[in-house]
Amino acid sequence: MAVSDIAWPDSPLDDLDAAFAALTCDPNPMTFDLDKLGGDTGLPGGVMTLPALRDWLLTHPRAYTARDAVWRDLVLRARLDGPAWVVAAAGMALPALRRCAGQLRVGWSGDAHDIDAEILTGFLAALRDRVDLSKPAPYASLCMAAWRAGFELRQRVGEAVPVDDVEHVAGPRTPTVPYGHPDLLVRRAVGLGLLDACDEQPYIDLRLGRRAIEPIAATMGITVDALRMRARRIDERIARALANGLLTGVASPQAAAELAATARHRKRTRAAVAAATGQPPTAPAAVAA
């Protein structure tokens, strides 16, 4: 079925259903090789079409190990292997997304398609960036993100209170802390040598942008574990600097010199590891200092 031949419905979830059907129909349905997930998952094994795999998971609701293995692979494919796998992952979750929509539409006076759109948007945001694959139950996290997005839409609409004149509204209007720009603190941390310039944007994407770690690590040419360790050590250095007032005040010449020396040592260590392994400093063997 060609994409141009699809009669697209109005509902975002029905749109997703049509796109998923186009990906998984004959003569070249999208498939999933279960043998690549290992033999201890409880999955039947072999190559299955995605609808067949979805049906198997639905009829085995307590197959937690199998579901986690499938969804870790689906999330990783959606992040690294292109838009088709994004549609595939969302289509695999469609029964749960429809269930969320049904629950959240109860008592909703707005357009039901708005709820559908928020649920799908929340799911896709979690699929792209929010769900941490090092933690258990990625599918549950995806579904919760979808439900939360729809619920927050209801809350926003329900809590909006129109006023005649904002100038006469009682109460403070100063934004609550934090209302600054934490990325500026990261830039200052780079200037002080708390993290290297090559780590600045990946760290901002990971910690402030809450982007998925796998594509960032792939772009840097290091493993996910190496990047996770590198980010954790940067967290510790920034936390100490904040506690000591180095990032919010003026660093003394002695403190600045010590930080610069530490940065030079870190750079030499990475270069030495790279030279010993024959890989560039950002390769997997150069685990972050």
Image (cartoon, rainbow, N blue to C red):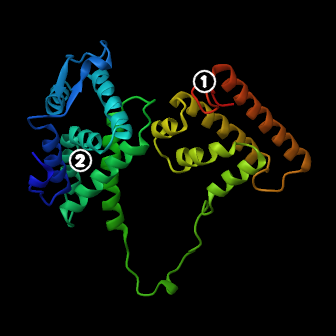
Horizontal side of 286 relative to 41 (left or right) equals: right
Q: Is residue 6 visible?
A: no
Q: Label 2 to label 1, Cα distance in Å?
A: 44 Å
Q: Nearer the viewer, mark 2 or mark 1?
A: 1
Image spot of residue 195 (x, y percent): 70, 42
Residue neighbourhood size for the residue with mark 2, other residues' Cα within 10 Å, grouped as few (<14), some (14–19), many (≥20): many
Horizontal side of 151 relative to 197 (left or right) equals: left
SS at badge 2: helix
Q: Residue at x 80, y 46 (%)?
A: 244
User: Could you say which quadrant of the image residue 49 lies in?
Assistant: top left
Image spot of residue 229 (x, y percent): 60, 30
Q: Are marks 2 and 1 in contact (CB under 8 Å)?
A: no
Q: Is residue 217 visible?
A: yes
Residue neighbourhood size for the residue with mark 1, other residues' Cα within 10 Å, grouped as few (<14), some (14–19), many (≥20): some
Image spot of residue 90 (x, y percent): 25, 43
Q: Residue at x 18, y 32 (%)?
A: 50
User: Could you say which quadrant of the image residue 278 lies in?
Assistant: top right
Q: Given the image, on which type of amino acid does mark 1 rest? A: Ala
The residue beneath circle 2 is: 100
Against 183, residue 88 (above or below) is above
Horizontal side of 5 relative to 102 (left or right) equals: left
Q: Residue at x 14, y 30 (%)?
A: 55
Q: Which mark is residue 285?
A: 1
Q: Given the image, on which type of amino acid does mark 2 rest? A: Cys
Q: Residue at x 22, y 37 (%)?
A: 92
Against 69, residue 191 (above or below) is below
Q: Quadrant of the N terminus?
A: top left
Image spot of residue 190 (x, y percent): 71, 48
Against 96, residue 247 (above or below) is below
Among numbered discs 2 and 1, the one appearing first in the sequence: 2
